[in-house]
Amino acid sequence: MKKYFAILLLILAGCVEDPEAPIADKPISGENCAYIICEGLWHYDNSSMGRYVGDSNAVVNDIYGIMNGGLKLGDLANGATIYGDYLYVVTTTPAMIEKIELKSGQIVGQLCIEPESDPRNIVVVNENLAYVTCLRTHSVRAFNPTTMEKLRINIAVGPAPEGIDCCGNYVFVANSGYGDFLADRPKAGTVSVINAASAEVLRELDCGANVIEIKANPRSNRVYAMYYNLPSLEDSLGGIVEYDAKTLKELRRLRLSGRAMNLTQTGDTLIFVNDSGAYIIDLYAKEMTPVKIISNPAPSEHWYSAAVSPDNRLFVGNAKNYMMLGDLLIYEFKTGGNLISKLTIGINPKKILFY
């Protein structure tokens, strides 16, 4: 959602760096690994996929190209998820879903959604069913993640759907309205609830303007939606809304300025980042109270993603000014935690996925 950077992007596009070339002696596999999916800039074909190797505490950038004969990932890699032994990555402009073997990093399947559908995010429900949100067609498409074949399911939802996740029998879809562009359309700022098996939209849940992200917690049967509010409302706050995944009732609501959220491995804590730093919310407390644990030492740089590793470290994707190579910041996951590592990654790190 960087429309106010559009003119700047056009002016500075020639100055954008390419992702760091891999160092020959840098190991590309090992234990305690993560994939970092970097959006790049829309229409500049510079999305990238890095692999963090925990054994050596190093990032191998462009692991996609290295392991697939120099191929490019595509343009605006926005969504990604891991299911079983595979990583699924969605690239918006070529309308492509890539199926990648986790360990090798090699492509094992590809699926092209309709041109100009602008797929954004993905959820795998089971080995035979996955859904992808399509921004421009205001719909959710289904496919078989094992065979990578389209299914004859095209579900109309709200305007400009982006985030998606599943919990139990339901799939939850964030109808963003794409900021100010479609904010006045019906169902903008809602969460569509889809019966995963029947592909029927059951209802729309009220959320907030410009709802972007959805995170489901199957352990507690809770779903969390983050909305940003509208860019035109300069002093407005977004927030996080908690829903009961069974009854579909809103349980709690918190106003805040957030850019990305995630759940910890245990599912009892929600983390989110904004330009001032990283925060945690104890989900079992009576109130959803954010506690700041890490301050961003350079608030002019934009923290764009976050995740907590299985060994309990906080990983932050720093997009800096959205135009240059980003940083992967690794902190101790505790209040005032020390910075452990700072590693160069691609442009606009959107997803951090451990395996």
Image (cartoon, rainbow, N blue to C red):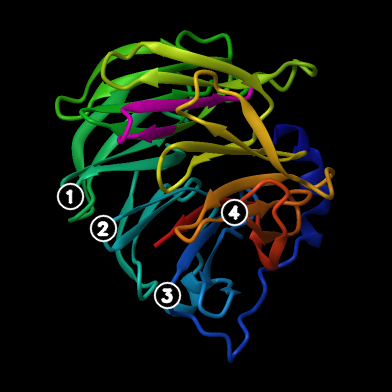
Indicate the position of residue 274 as horizontal and vertical percent values: 70, 37
Instruction: Name the disc covering residue 127, or none.
Output: 1
Dot 1 alpha-carbon crowd within 10 angstroms: few under 14, some 14 to 19, many 20 or more: few
Kindly identify the residue that appears in the image at 72 percent across and 61 percent down: 339
From the image, tell me which residue sits under label 2: 84
Q: Is mark 4 on a helix, strand or loop?
A: strand
Tell me the amino acid under the disc marked 2: Gly
Would residue 333 be seen by someone viewing this image from the given angle? yes
Pointer 2: residues within 10 angstroms few (<14), some, or many (20+)?
few
Label 4 to label 1: alpha-carbon separation: 30 Å
Q: Position of residue 128 (x, y in %)?
A: 15, 46
Q: Given contact means CB atoms under 8 Å apart, are the residues at marks 2 and 1 in contact? A: yes
Q: Does the magenta stretch include residue 222?
A: yes
Q: What element carries label 3?
A: loop
Which residue is located at x 45 percent, y 69 percent?
Answer: 32
- Side of 150 where 223 appears, left or right: right
* Disc number for residue 168: none
Along the polypeptide, which appears first: circle 2 or circle 1?
2
Q: Where is residue 292 in the image (x, y as percent from the top left)?
A: 70, 37
x 68%, y 46%: residue: 335
Mark 1 residue element: loop
Question: In terms of image quadrants, where is residue 121?
Answer: top left
Left or right: where does residue 313 sit relative to residue 329?
A: left
Per the rendered image, the range of residues in magenta is 215-228
